Image: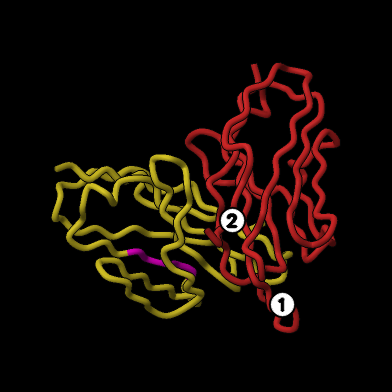
Amino acid sequence: DTGVSQDPRHKITKRGQNVTFRCDPISEHNRLYWYRQTLGQGPEFLTYFQNEAQLEKSRLLSDRFSAERPKGSFSTLEIQRTEQGDSAMYLCASSLATVILHQPGELFFGEGSRLTVL
Amino acid sequence: GIQVEQSPPDLILQEGANSTLRCNFSDSVNNLQWFHQNPWGQLINLFYIPSGTKQNGRLSATTVATERYSLLYISSSQTTDSGVYFCAVEQFGYGQNFVFGPGTRLSVLP
């Protein structure tokens, strides 16, 4: 399978615990995005990477959230001291951006990681 | 930031019917995509269509960037078309992330 893969698919945790999600993008894609989606809403942008550089972060990304893409391949999203309001689907997407034309390219999403905080 | 609206919010169809979903956006966009979110939550790419018209089987899409809207046409709907349809736009000059609309929930009845 050469699509975007996310792990774990489901995570149930207690309030105050830390959780980490992993995303493996399509192999030749240079751009990687994280989005969050709550029930009945559209996905909301969290952050994106161009290769290993984190170029943009949403105000939604509080200090408890951190994302990395250390070698420009896979990425991790960590949530520290989880709160019940963090319960959501965390979506990863990748694209092949054309740097010269500043075009982000077509987004391809993974199946998501669903977080439930008790 | 850019505002994205979708209409109608909900749509119920009988199998075989046709439908048109609309996406309006408040400012100039570089890019626009249509997605179908299936009942398991996966976002499936339908069209990458910053302007013009594209067709893929029973689905087609038209974006009129100068008038700030896009339309998704579904013909001869099937029960497997059920789910939520999102449009997402990348705003010109405002970073390079896509902003999603609230979606249209489609239910196709057998």
Q: Residue at x 41, y 63 (%)?
A: B46
Residue type marked 1: His
Q: Residues within 10 Å of mark 1 (few under 14, many from 20)?
A: few
Chain B tint in image: yellow
Looking at the picture, the colour scheme in use is: by chain
Classify the position of the N terminus of chain B by image quarter. Answer: bottom right
Chain A tint in image: red
Left or right of A106, for residue B48:
left
Left or right of B72, for residue A30:
right
Comes first in the chain, label 2 or label 1: 2
Left or right of B20, for residue A14:
right
Say the numbered circle drawn on residue A4.
2
Q: Residues within 10 Å of mark 2 (few under 14, many from 20)?
A: many
Say the numbered circle drawn on residue B87.
none
Left or right of B82, for residue A99:
right
Q: Position of residue A35 (x, y in %)?
A: 64, 47
